[in-house]
Every structure is written in structure tokens, then in C-alpha cells.
Amino acid sequence: MVKKKEISENSVLFEMHPLGNAVKVVAIDQISGTEVSVVVPKGTAPFTMKAQAFRKLVYVINKGKDSGDADDEADDDKRDNKKHKIDIET
């Protein structure tokens, strides 16, 4: 069984770009350089926007772990082993 990576919300950068009636939210993991984006309705709460992007980032990083990347062990050593907990202040 593959061990899942644990990502700290402190190592993730968020960008929000308004696009008409929607907002594109980009989440970037500073350690691995992995970047994902989601598009949400304009009236969505900022916490919800960030939480959705963070969940997608966790999914993409853990999915990449299954491919056997050589850098995965180095990334694991850099992480502070926090759970996938989101405490984002807006």
C-alpha cells in the first residue's frame, strides 16, 4: 500500500482570478511545485474556494505518488507531517 503524502496548508499558495460570473482558484504547493486550478461560482465563500482547490491539490499530489516519482521521498522529508486539515483564515 502506498503511503499518502501529508500536505500542510502553510506550504500552499492560493491565487484567485475573477472570470465574469466565476472565479478561477489556483493552489500551488511550494515544496513540490505542483499547481492545480478549479473554477467556482462568483458568490462562493473564500474559505470554500480555497478548501476545494486544496482538496484537489492533495488528490493530484497523492495520485502522482502512485507513479513512483524519485523526488517523492525528498518531498516527504521536507513536509512537516500535518494532517490534511484546512484552517484557512480569510
Image (cartoon, rainbow, N blue to C red):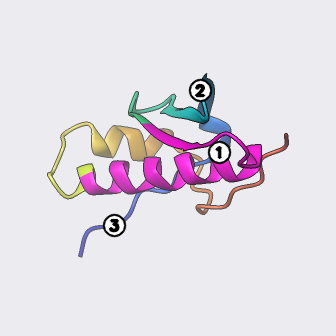
State the residue position of label 1: 50
- Local SS, label 2: loop
Q: Nearer the viewer, residue 77 or 5?
A: 5
Disc nearest the viewer among 3 and 1: 1
State the residue position of label 3: 3
Magenta region:
37-63
Q: In the image, 36: left or right of 14?
A: left
Helix, strand or loop: magenta stretch = helix
Q: Position of residue 58 (x, y in %)?
A: 45, 53
* 24 shown above or below 69: above
- 3D distance between C-alphas at marks 3 and 2: 40 Å
- 3D distance between C-alphas at marks 1 and 2: 19 Å
Q: In the image, 75: left or right of 29?
A: left
Disc sitting over residue 33 in the figure: none
User: Magenta includes 26?
Assistant: no
The residue positioned farthest toward the left in the image shown: 67
Disc sitting over residue 20 in the figure: 2
| Position of the C terminus by quadrant | top right
- 3D distance between C-alphas at marks 3 and 1: 25 Å
Q: Amino acid at mark 2?
A: Gly
Q: Nearer the viewer, residue 78 or 39?
A: 39
Q: Amino acid at mark 1?
A: Lys
Disc nearest the viewer among 3 and 2: 2
